[in-house]
Image (cartoon, rainbow, N blue to C red):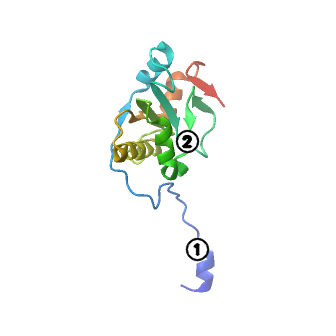
Amino acid sequence: MSLVDQHTTAPPTTYSWSAGLPEPCSSPEGIPAEQVESFIKSGDKVPGKDYIVVDVRRTDFEDYAISGALNLPAESFYATRAGVVSVLFKVPLVIFHCQSCASTKSRGQKVAAYYQDALDEKGIKTSKALYLEGGIKGWIQKYKEDAKLVVKL
């Protein structure tokens, strides 16, 4: 390859937020949107105590969010997982989501797996990672008009 070719070669067009990170060992279960909706609406479960929703979007964190969700971007999660575990280990259900959680390679599922791996490494049984089936896209399709469930950004 000549020097001219080196300078005209286009950079890769895809970016993987998890490039260079180990593959997680865990395979967290999905939780249906309807179940999370019942947590929020029924009042039977207390957010931050019985469950918490963690939104792992970063640059695509726009338009809508789930009411009461934390935003912990996937890009920085792996490096901070020990700190996250130290804060959330008493919350029984930690529900992660991204844009769609459509595949096993989705940010929501992968971050949930990193959280579960960190719990398992420490022998913590008081918390469990789940991912929101359908992600924010599925949530918005169902609940876009419900101000108790959705925050317009």
Q: Residue furthest right?
A: 153
Mark 1 surroundings within 10 Å by alpha-carbon count, few (fewer than 14), some (14 through 19), many (20 or more): few
Give the SS element for disc 2.
loop
Mark 2 surroundings within 10 Å by alpha-carbon count, few (fewer than 14), some (14 through 19), many (20 or more): some
The x, y position of residue 15, in whole percent, is: 53, 58
Q: Which of marks 1 and 2 is in front?
A: 2
Nearer the observer, 142 or 23? 23
Query: Residue flagged by tag 2: what amino acid is it?
Result: Leu
Nearer the observer, 124 or 16? 124
Q: In this view, does 11 lie above or below 149?
A: below
Please name the residue shown 50% across and 31% down the image.
Answer: 53
Please name the residue shown 41% across and 30% down the image.
Answer: 93
Q: Is residue 74 above or below residue 2?
A: above
**What's the CA distance linking mark 1 and mark 2?**
34 Å
Query: Residue flagged by tag 1: what amino acid is it?
Result: Thr
The x, y position of residue 81, in whole percent, is: 48, 47
Quadrant for the C terminus in the image: top right
Please name the residue shown 42% across and 21% down the image.
Answer: 34
The x, y position of residue 143, in whole percent, is: 53, 22
Nearer the observer, 125 or 75? 125
Q: Where is mark 1, residue-wise?
A: 9
The x, y position of residue 27, in whole percent, is: 33, 43
Give the SS element for disc 1.
loop
The disc label shown at residue 32, or none: none
Q: Where is mark 2, residue-wise?
A: 72
Q: Which residue lies furthest to the bottom in this view?
A: 2
Q: In this view, does 69 lie above or below 78?
A: above
Q: Number of marks in the image?
A: 2
Q: In which quarter of the image is residue 148?
A: top right
Q: Earlier in the sequence, mark 1 or mark 2?
A: 1
The answer to the question of whether label 1 and label 2 lie on touching residues, with beta carbons closer than 8 A, is no
